[in-house]
Image (tube, coloured by chain):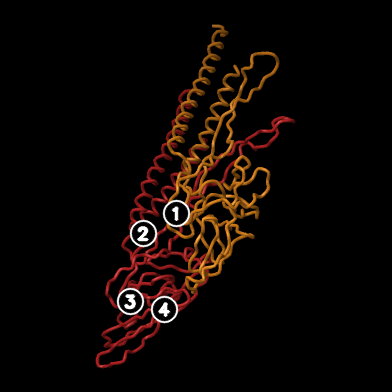
């Protein structure tokens, strides 16, 4: 059989994978601080000899995430914060390494440690942030956290810690398998003083439902064309078999 | 089969849970002392189909690989312990907590549950109970013939009886507080129980050491914000529709290949 059917097959297979990437973006329409994944297709030529270079297979890649800001949602919860503009919040991944996230929906656990919604410790000046029992907490625009300890008056507001906010070069940032961002070179990012946060706000998912859905429809049609090509290759093969058949 | 189907399924399931949370919040708009829940989403693990940085030949590397996400899930529902509106009822046995803290209720099995609902009543034995008839802890018994009960900001309960000038002190209502109130486990009936996440209960007198003061003749209404819930409901519905569209698109793709090949 002609190799055309295999080329069309890689097209169809990679369309399906691209579809999964878009489906994941769509599933995370309401995930706080989620960054949409890009998906792109590339032709991978497999050429040999001097013949016509027609054997180019399709290859789907996820080159990067879309780092555009998501919508700002006012929640009024003192433990919520959103980053304005570029930057990330440093958190401790389960394996002890440092990861970066844009999801600022925090809570305080039974031991007074500041944690993200999925239980990762938020990093401050020196490691995880711990609070004494507290009455009020305020997050300043540079990530400084001031607290009023339980049973104290408003005049006792003290600076407790400062969130570790980083602003690494986005070209050097990639999403890990756990959804946290890390530097490609494996190093930890420097503390950046210019990152601005807003307390009482959350950053919504930056997935654009319209463009995702348009992409999904375009991919579905492209997939149908690949299938048509496979069908044509099959028909051609059937016709040539019939020609050579002795009746 | 096609993983897009399963990825969208996680989106549908998470939006479904979000809608349950919203409908529970809306259903409890008039529940005294109710604290609203918020569903928190998290992206699931990513699968590396092709590792970025792998050698494509001896001298060249793949500039970017292919990582496919596997969807979303509701990682937690967080109780929001913001203060509800204080509503004046003029009922002597209604108390609202203005600030932190929980009233303690003795459950039938002898353990303590915690509540922000201050609708108290008196049972046939004169004990102060909640709406379900569970006794307030520490127990306070109102004597026969008491015609007026006062509850002070600090929790002191006094009763005035006919013919006596001086009030009779019946006891003190104490409050309990937690490091992480959001970690309390809601058990229904407006009650919460302690969990590992909430930390141990710390008892204190109302109005002291950070505890809220008690306000007699007031109730704390539910802290559900109807407008916010409505907006959340709209986004949930649309996100659900979008995800179901992805499911049907993936289905059509599979249908097309099975019919045409």
Q: Write down the residue under mark 1.
A: B39
Measuring from the top left, give residue A89's x and y in whole percent.
57, 52
- Disc 1 + disc 3, Cβ < 8 Å: no
For the residues labelled 2 and 3, the Cα–Cα distance comes to 23 Å
Of the two numbered discs 4 and 3 in the rendering, the one whose residue sits closer to the viewer:
3
Q: Write down the residue under mark 2.
A: B224
In the rendered view, tell whether residue A114 sits above or below residue A43: below
In the rendered view, tell whether residue A93 sits above or below residue B253: below
Q: Which chain is red?
A: B
The furthest residue to the right: B58
Q: Is residue B10 visible?
A: no
Of the two numbered discs 1 and 3 in the rendering, the one whose residue sits closer to the viewer:
3
Between disc 4 and disc 3, whose residue precedes? 4
Q: Write down the residue under mark 3.
A: B216
Of the two numbered discs 1 and 4 in the rendering, the one whose residue sits closer to the viewer:
1
Crowding near pointer 1: few (<14 within 10 Å), some, many (20+)? many
For the residues labelled 1 and 3, the Cα–Cα distance comes to 34 Å
Between disc 4 and disc 2, whose residue precedes? 4
Crowding near pointer 4: few (<14 within 10 Å), some, many (20+)? many
Label 1: which secondary element? strand
For the N terminus of chain A, which image quadrant? top right
Between disc 2 and disc 3, whose residue precedes? 3
Residue at 51 percent across and 59 percent down: it is A139
Between disc 1 and disc 3, whose residue precedes? 1
Can marks 2 and 1 be said to lie on one chain?
yes
User: In which quarter of the view is residue B149 placed?
Assistant: bottom left
């Amino acid at each position: 059989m002609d190799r055309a059917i295999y080329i069309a097959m890689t097209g169809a297979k990679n369309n399906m994978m691209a579809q999964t990437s878009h489906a994941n973006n769509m599933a995370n329409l309401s995930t706080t601080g989620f960054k949409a994944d890009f998906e792109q297709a590339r032709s991978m030529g497999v050429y040999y000899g001097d013949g016509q270079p027609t054997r180019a297979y399709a290859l789907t890649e996820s080159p990067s995430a879309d780092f555009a800001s998501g919508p700002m949602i006012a929640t009024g919860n003192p433990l919520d914060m959103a980053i304005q503009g570029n930057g990330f919040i440093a958190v401790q991944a389960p394996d002890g390494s440092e990861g970066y996230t844009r999801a600022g929906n925090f809570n305080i656990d039974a031991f007074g440690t500041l944690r993200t919604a999925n239980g990762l410790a938020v990093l401050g000046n020196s490691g995880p942030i711990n609070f004494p029992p507290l009455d009020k907490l305020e997050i300043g625009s540079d990530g400084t956290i001031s607290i009023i300890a339980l049973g104290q008056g408003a005049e006792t507001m003290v600076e407790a810690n400062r969130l570790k906010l980083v602003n690494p070069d986005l070209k050097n940032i990639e999403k890990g398998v756990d959804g946290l961002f890390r530097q490609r070179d494996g190093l930890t990012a420097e503390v950046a003083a210019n990152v601005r946060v807003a307390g009482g706000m959350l950053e919504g998912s930056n997935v654009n439902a319209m463009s995702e859905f348009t992409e999904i429809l375009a991919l579905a049609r492209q997939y149908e064309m690949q299938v048509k090509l496979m069908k044509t290759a099959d028909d051609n093969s059937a016709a040539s078999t019939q020609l050579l058949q002795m009746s | 089969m096609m993983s897009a189907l399963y990825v969208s399924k996680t989106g549908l399931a998470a939006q479904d849970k979000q809608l349950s949370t919203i409908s529970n919040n809306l259903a409890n708009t008039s529940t005294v002392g109710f604290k609203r829940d918020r569903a928190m989403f998290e992206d699931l693990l990513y699968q590396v189909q092709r590792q970025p940085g792998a050698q494509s030949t001896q001298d060249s590397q793949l500039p970017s690989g292919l990582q496919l996400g596997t969807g979303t899930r509701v990682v937690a529902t967080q109780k929001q312990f913001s203060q509800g509106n204080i509503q004046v009822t003029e009922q002597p046995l209604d108390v609202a907590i203005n600030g932190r803290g929980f009233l303690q209720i003795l459950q039938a099995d002898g353990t303590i549950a915690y509540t922000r609902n201050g609708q108290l009543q008196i049972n046939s034995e004169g004990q102060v109970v909640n709406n379900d008839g569970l006794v307030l802890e520490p127990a306070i018994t109102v004597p026969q013939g008491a015609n007026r009960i006062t509850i002070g900001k600090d929790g002191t309960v006094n009763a005035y009886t006919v013919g006596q000038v001086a009030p009779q002190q019946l006891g003190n209502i104490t409050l309990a507080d937690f490091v992480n109130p959001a970690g309390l486990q809601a058990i229904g009936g407006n009650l919460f129980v302690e969990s590992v996440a909430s930390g141990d209960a710390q008892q204190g007198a109302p109005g002291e050491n950070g505890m809220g003061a008690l306000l007699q003749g007031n109730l704390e209404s539910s802290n559900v914000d109807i407008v916010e819930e409505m907006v959340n409901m709209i986004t949930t519905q649309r996100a659900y529709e979008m995800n179901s569209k992805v499911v049907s698109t993936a289905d059509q793709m599979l249908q097309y290949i099975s019919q045409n090949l």
